[in-house]
Image (spheres, rainbow, N blue to C red):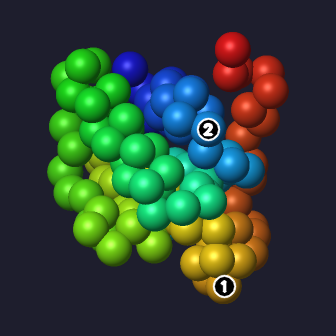
Amino acid sequence: MNGEQMAYFLANIIDDKKGHDIVILNMQGISVMADYFIICHGNSEKQVQAIARGLKEGAQEQQIEVKRMEGFDQARWVLVDLGDVIAHIFHKEERDYYKLEKLWGDAPTLSLESKMS
């Protein structure tokens, strides 16, 4: 599974967990941290944790290594590092505050409608 396929796979998991406003940013040539960022939010700490847990379980089922997960206990901004893809799962209030999409506004956005089913 290449980075783009992984990003869509993970976005589908987020969608299944009712994550809101899912955005995939193509970070190739922009950031050395990862090729793709996924940004989404949940409306409660429990939902943020459920999304993060779902990503971890789905990745493990596909033998995708979860390199690191940070922020799970507080569930305000959970970062899930999967190598080529980093998922940022925010609580809605934190997402509104940090505006990560605007910070990386020069990154192309991948279309979810054409790939997610």
Q: Which mark is residue 18?
A: 2
State how far apart marks 1 and 2 are (Cα): 21 Å
The quarter of the image holding the C terminus is top right
- 40 left or right of 83 in image: right
Q: Residue furthest top?
A: 117
Mark 1 lies on residue: 97
The quarter of the image holding the N terminus is top left
Q: Residue furthest bottom?
A: 97
Q: Amino acid at mark 2?
A: Lys
Tell me if residue 40 comes above or below residue 79 in the rendering.
above
Q: Name the element at disc 1.
A: helix
Badge 1: residue crowd in 10 Å (few <14, some 14–19, many ≥20): few
Q: Amino acid at mark 1?
A: Tyr
Please name whichever residue, 13 or 33, is drawn nearer the observer in this view of the structure: 13
Residue 11 seen in the figure: no
Of the two numbered discs 1 and 2 on the same chain, state the one appearing first in sequence.
2
The answer to which quarter of the image holds residue 18 is: top right
Residue 9 seen in the figure: yes
